[in-house]
Amino acid sequence: MALTRLDRRYGSAVRGVWTSVLGRTTRSFLGLGSWRDEDADRFRRQTLPVILAGERQVASLTASYLEQLYKDVDARGPRVSLDLDEVTGTALRGVDPGTVYDRPFKELRAALGDDVALDEAVNRGAHRLETLVKTDLQLARTHTVREVSADMPRFTYTVRELQGEYDCALCIIASTQRYHKRNLAPIHPGCDCLVKTVTADYDPGQVIDEDTLERLHDLVEEAVGKADRGGRAVDYRKILVANDHGEMGPVLGFKGQRFTGPDDIKLPT
């Protein structure tokens, strides 16, 4: 389905939140100058409110977006009611955000313990921070979709809509599938796909344009070492899996790839 004006407006608003939150948190981390325990405490005091505010913005934007989508199928649909505490902060992972956002510092210290140069160790910590922030902003969206759509009986499934800027092989393959709305939509860090709610008779389709299909072949080959140049996007469904991550829920990946936890999740670049 082609992106509508509403889709684009919502996608642009969410990207604006991502850009703002990522920029502020990354600058704060890189600007610490030292990364001792007291620096980590100061960083969390300064940035956790920024991250939580970003999550709440994404959740509010998503709830409003879904409400407008529902009006297209039921003009008398009720106003959306959402408890933001249920779809942000600790609710996303079941882990205190203070614990989560100590991980970039642990990453940095582990690198220093392996005799990695300070600049490289800081970069590794910053990359871990970026992964965490992008994931939490994405989880705020998927948790909101699940919560809000539960009260929208005309909607049965969720689908992924490609936005084009960061589409990877996982995104493209997943965009040919439907997921039941009661299940948390699978994610992967860095994904900027829209998650749309749809009626039971909606089929996302199995055809993508030739340029995107050619790019998909290249991306699959890069990820798993081989590709079916004569195949369609839907033919790759058999290698797409959703690994169960203890904190994040279902995470998209390729069948046969090693997956034991967050260290196996690669952030698309």
Image (cartoon, rainbow, N blue to C red):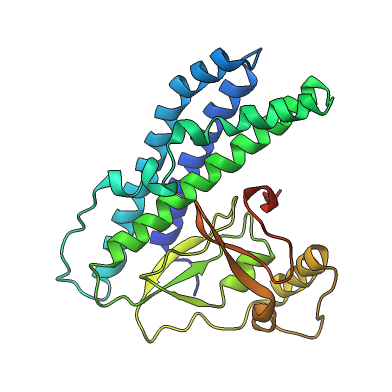
Tell me: 202 left or right of 104.
left
Q: Is residue 255 above or below residue 207?
A: above
Q: Is residue 255 above or below residue 202?
A: above
Task: Give the camera-side residue of 210 and 109.
Answer: 109
Residue drawn where x is 47% and y is 25% of the image: 47
Residue drawn where x is 54% and y is 44% of the image: 134
Q: Position of residue 222 (x, y in %)?
A: 82, 63
Q: Is residue 9 visible?
A: no
Q: Is residue 143 visible?
A: yes
Tell me: 101 left or right of 241.
left
Q: Is residue 237 above or below residue 46?
A: below
Tell me: 182 left or right of 18.
left
Q: Position of residue 181 (x, y in %)?
A: 37, 71
Residue drawn where x is 26% and y is 61% of the image: 67
Q: Position of residue 121 (x, y in %)?
A: 75, 27
Task: Give the camera-side residue of 239 and 59.
Answer: 239
Q: How many marks?
A: 0
Residue 163 sits in quarter: bottom right
Residue drawn where x is 39% and y is 28% of the image: 49
Q: Position of residue 3 (x, y in %)?
A: 48, 66
Q: Is residue 35 above or below residue 258?
A: above
